[in-house]
Image (cartoon, helix red, strand yellow):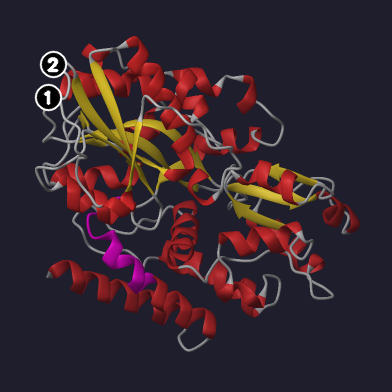
């Protein structure tokens, strides 16, 4: 997703919008609804990769709504969640936060977010125009707590020239065919692909993604861990076998998504599995690279991708909920969703725009038809390191796949029992 891509924008100064640095601390700035009689102030915490567009939108909205002032606080990927968690639990909570779709349910379950169904409709938010899988992630007990504006999942990027040299005109449609191709392409220090196992979140996501393809899940309906299911074992076996048998890079344990992209761009990997946000980065950083895109291969055809995205959510402690909802409606219009994403908007209307209809992006759009949300469990942040630890053990060969999966399930069940 866009969070991992640094935009190359020139700074745009908009005097009508106050930008508050996170370094200055959490909570609301000195401005308030009292600074001008009759003017309501709302605060939007937006990430630094959306900073330019967020400033523009705030200025545009203020011009059309002189009775509403928008203060912006710029967050960053490394600290945004902890800062929002602290602020939104206090009386200094911002009105609006940009957050991952999968972060909404944990906040909503604690009563920290305002349901948007009625407020949103009154303000003009067209929920029917938002893709259902994205809206499902931000809904709890039938109520919508976050308004999605970005939604995407992974797909395949492949080196057209390397595949042609091995006799392939198109990317394989099944996992077994992909494995066969990868073995042919893994010679002279080059490999079919790599796994981003050097980063905890990247690694866990890839395992869950594989598991979804085999019909598995992390927990069953009763809350019991299913990481020792046959689906989980098949998924981990795919990762372990690919590295131990030499058709995925042995350096996978040191890779994250960025280093994997660099290795692909340099021609050391024949393909990689990542998100649509890398299209423009590859074109810019590796202009000589001849690449194509494809859906993820599965058992008998397209595999399953994990999906996530970004939304705006309203604090339950906001004093200006109606004004904030009006601004949220403006942020999430199809036109503005298109401005805020390098991948895909969550708006069905915006998805039809020309900028999202390129040949490179078409497979990613198709892949969303077979997508499933990344885990949204309240204690996922505690489960993830357990999964990561045993994945590393299995890849290193200190545990078998069966042993690693059984240990994962046992430790996660013990965690959730406390």
Q: Is residue 159 above or below residue 113?
A: below
Nearer-the-camera pick, 165 or 359:
359
- Quadrant of the image occupied by residue 43: top left
- Quadrant of the image occupied by residue 295: top right
Residue 386 lies in the magenta-colored region: yes
Name the residue carrying label 2. 37
**Residue shown at 58%/69% (left/top)?**
255
Q: What crowding class fits label 1: few (fewer than 14 Cα within 10 Å), some (14-19), or many (20 or more)?
A: few
Instruction: Tell me if residue 385 can be seen.
Output: yes
Q: Is residue 118 above or below residue 8?
A: above
Quarter of the picture holding the C terminus: bottom left
Q: Picture coordinates of residue 373 (x, y %)?
A: 39, 45
Nearer-the-camera pick, 251 or 64:
64
| Boundaries of the magenta span | 376-387
Q: Are marks 2 and 1 in contact (CB under 8 Å)?
A: yes
- Per the image, label 2 sits on a secondary structure element best described as loop
Q: Picture coordinates of residue 224 (x, y %)?
A: 22, 62
Q: Picture coordinates of residue 185 (x, y %)?
A: 80, 65
Q: Give the dominant element type of the magenta stretch: helix, strand or loop.
A: helix
Q: Picture coordinates of residue 363 (x, y %)?
A: 64, 37
Number of marks drawn? 2
Q: Is residue 47 above or below residue 70?
A: below
- Per the image, label 1 sits on a secondary structure element best described as loop
Instruction: Tell me if residue 1 can be seen.
Output: no
Q: What whole-number distance in Å separates the C-alpha atoms at marks 2 and 1?
A: 6 Å
Name the residue carrying label 1. 34
Q: Is residue 308 above or below residue 183?
A: above
Nearer-the-camera pick, 341 or 197:
341
**Residue shown at 16%/25% (left/top)?**
35
Residue 49 lies in the magenta-colored region: no
- Quadrant of the image occupied by residue 267: bottom right
**Residue shown at 35%/71% (left/top)?**
385
């Amino acid at each position: 997703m866009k969070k991992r891509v640094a935009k190359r924008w020139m700074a745009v100064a908009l005097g009508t919008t106050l930008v508050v640095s996170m370094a200055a601390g959490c909570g609301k700035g000195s401005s308030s609804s009292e600074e001008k009689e009759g003017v309501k102030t709302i605060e939007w915490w937006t990430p630094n990769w959306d900073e330019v567009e967020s400033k523009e939108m705030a200025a545009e909205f203020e011009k059309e709504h002189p009775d509403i002032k928008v203060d912006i606080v710029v967050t960053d990927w490394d600290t945004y969640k902890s800062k929002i968690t602290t602020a939104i639990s206090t009386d200094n909570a911002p009105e609006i936060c940009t957050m991952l779709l999968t972060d909404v349910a944990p906040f909503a379950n604690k009563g920290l977010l305002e349901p948007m169904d009625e407020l949103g409709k009154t303000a003009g938010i067209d929920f029917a125009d938002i893709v259902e899988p994205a809206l499902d992630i931000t809904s709890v007990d039938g109520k919508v707590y976050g308004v999605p504006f970005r939604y995407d999942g992974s797909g395949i990027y492949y080196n057209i020239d390397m595949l042609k040299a091995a006799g392939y005109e198109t990317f394989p449609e099944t996992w077994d065919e992909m494995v066969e191709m990868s073995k042919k392409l893994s010679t002279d220090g080059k490999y079919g692909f790599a796994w981003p196992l050097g980063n905890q979140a990247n690694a866990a996501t890839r395992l869950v993604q594989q598991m979804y393809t085999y019909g598995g899940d992390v927990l069953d309906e009763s809350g019991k861990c299913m990481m020792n299911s046959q689906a989980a074992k098949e998924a981990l076996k795919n990762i372990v076998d690919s590295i131990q048998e030499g058709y995925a890079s042995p350096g996978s344990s040191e890779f994250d998504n960025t280093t994997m992209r660099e290795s692909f761009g340099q021609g050391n990997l024949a393909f990689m599995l990542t998100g649509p946000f890398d299209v423009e980065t590859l074109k810019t950083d590796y202009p000589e690279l001849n690449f194509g895109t494809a859906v993820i291969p599965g058992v008998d055809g397209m595999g399953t991708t994990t999906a996530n995205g970004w939304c705006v959510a309203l604090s339950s402690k906001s004093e200006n909920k109606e004004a904030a909802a009006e601004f949220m409606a403006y942020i999430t219009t199809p036109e503005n969703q298109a401005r805020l994403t390098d991948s895909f908007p969550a708006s069905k209307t915006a998805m039809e725009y020309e900028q999202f209809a390129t040949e490179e992006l078409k497979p990613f759009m198709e892949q969303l038809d077979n997508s499933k949300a990344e885990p949204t469990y309240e204690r996922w942040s505690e489960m993830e390191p357990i999964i990561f630890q045993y994945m590393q053990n299995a890849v290193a060969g200190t545990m078998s796949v069966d042993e690693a999966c059984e240990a994962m399930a046992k430790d996660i069940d013990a965690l959730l029992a406390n």
